[in-house]
Amino acid sequence: MTAPLYLEDLHVGQTFVSGPVVITADEIKAFARQFDPQPFHLYEEAAKDSLFGGLAASGWHTAALTMRLLVEAFPLAGGLVGAGGETTWPRPTRPGDVLTVHVEVLEILPSRTRADRGMIRTRSETRNQHGEAVQISTTRIVAWRRPD
């Protein structure tokens, strides 16, 4: 396991890349049954006639997988505690896609009122095996300072 990263360990432009995760049709359908039961996430035939033109993972499924990969690739001390952001899904995640997350530190803002922490702003792209972004997020994350 990689040592946890503190605010002092980070710099603007720093990047992290996760390992891969493969998504299957069965996983897409299982997630959809529980959390986003729409026909284009559940049934191949119904999905063919949808905007997606085939079975597609819920954006929230892609987001959950992204979170898992971020936790593995970007080990901030105290965990990845989000403080707002924006997420888009420029293309669907499909069965058989191999996803990786690429995250870049965009900004580092030490807190003026709390000496033990700061805020960072990151941009992450979840990409498929073709290097195409299936999710793009810009997020503010709490980052802790190294304890004395």
Image (spheres, rainbow, N blue to C red):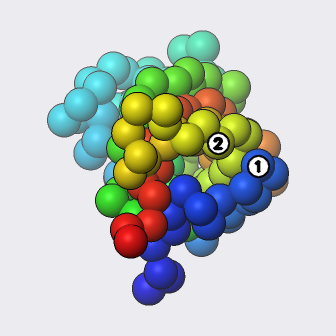
Q: Which residue does the image show at 30% across and 34% down from the upper left?
A: 32
Viewer-proximal residue, 120 or 104? Answer: 120
Residue 9 in sight from this viewpoint = yes
Quarter occupied by the N terminus: bottom left
Viewer-proximal residue, 104 or 117? Answer: 117
Viewer-proximal residue, 19 or 115? Answer: 115
137 sits to left or right of 33: right
* Amino acid type of the residue tagged 2 in the rendering: Ile
Q: Which residue does the image show at 45% across and 24% down from the upper left?
A: 84
Tell me the residue that label 1 is attached to. Answer: 12
Residue 115: percent from left, percent from top: 41, 46
* Amino acid type of the residue tagged 1 in the rendering: Val
Q: Secondary structure at mark 1?
A: loop
Residue 126: percent from left, percent from top: 63, 46
Tell me the residue that label 2 is attached to. Answer: 108
Circle 1/circle 2 CB separation < 8 Å: yes
Q: Secondary structure at mark 2?
A: strand
Choose the circle earlier in sequence order: 1 or 2.
1
CA neighbours of label 1 inside 10 A, class few (<14), some (14 to 19), many (20+): few
Residue projecting furthest to the bottom: 1
Q: Which residue does the image show at 60% across and 71% down from the upper left?
A: 19
Residue 28: percent from left, percent from top: 39, 44
